[in-house]
Amino acid sequence: MEIIYSFILCYFFHSSYAFLQLPDVPRKHIKTIEVSNGGWWGDWHPPHFCADGYFATGYNMKIEGNQHGHDDTSLNAILLRCNSFDGHYGGIIESGEGSYGDWVGWTDCEKSEAHNNQTYLTAFSLQVEGDQSGGDDTAANFIKFKCRDFDDDRDDSILAHPPGHGLFGRYGGWSESCATHSAICGIQTRIEGPQGGGIHGDDTSLNNVKFFCCAK
């Protein structure tokens, strides 16, 4: 039976602006990159991928600011911007979204100094607050990436939205990197839904994330 996948781009609204999101189209990936310090609350949402021939070149975060003694959640969602090698825009992908906070703005890879080529997201590190043992938990707070030329693994740089860190917790180690001739093309996040009010209503929202590497 022939399966035909539609590549229709749909409009969604977040905060005060609209963005394009690609549908959940299967794409062959060659590697999954993860970190060891991710939170454990919530459920994994379905992965989403850039369309074939497109790779992640930038990211945006949805973050809840300091609640000053009330329930904090910090990082609530991550968006990836997809682009092709010839510079064509390929939409935005997301895997699940928490209920709290605002989008902080886009942070994008620059061209490589060695080859003047577009660079792509290839590795990441996650800032996570550990279990507070009855205190206010936030789990994931911030994320930063490494950008690299698609075909040259000797020229990478760290990409972090200012100020480079969140309010709570600390960064763990870097994930493995996508291999040479590959880059991040997909995302999957683990998010805890709203826990309600009262003594047991401690929300953490985004807890963990993994990314997928694709080749040409």
Image (spheres, rainbow, N blue to C red):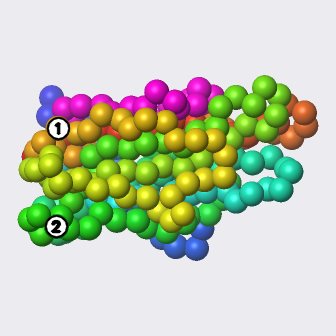
What amino acid type is highlighted by mark number 1?
Ala
Q: Residue at x 49, y 36 (%)?
A: 172
Amino acid on which the number 2 mark rests in the picture: Glu
Q: CA distance from mark 1 to mark 2?
A: 20 Å
- Tell me the crowding category of disc 1: few under 14, some 14 to 19, or many 20 or more residues within 10 angstroms, Cα based: some
Residue 65 placed where, x, y %?
70, 59
Which numbered tag is attached to residue 179?
1
Q: Residue extending furthest right? A: 198
Q: Secondary structure at mark 2?
A: loop
**Left or right of residue 44: residue 68:** right
The segment highlighted magenta reads: 27-45
Q: Quadrant of residue 119?
A: bottom left
Tell me where residue 130 appears, x and y as whole percent.
Answer: 65, 32
Tag 2: Cα neighbours inside 10 Å, few (<14), some, or many (≥20)?
A: few
Figure quadrant of residue 163: bottom right
Residue 38 inside the magenta-drawn segment = yes
Which percent across, then down, holds residue 15? 60, 68
Secondary structure, mark 1, is: loop
- Residue 179 in picture, x, y percent from top left: 17, 38
Q: Residue at position x 80%, y 46% from top?
A: 71
**Between marks 1 and 2 in the image, the one whose residue lies nearer the viewer:** 2
Residue at the disc numbered 2: 113
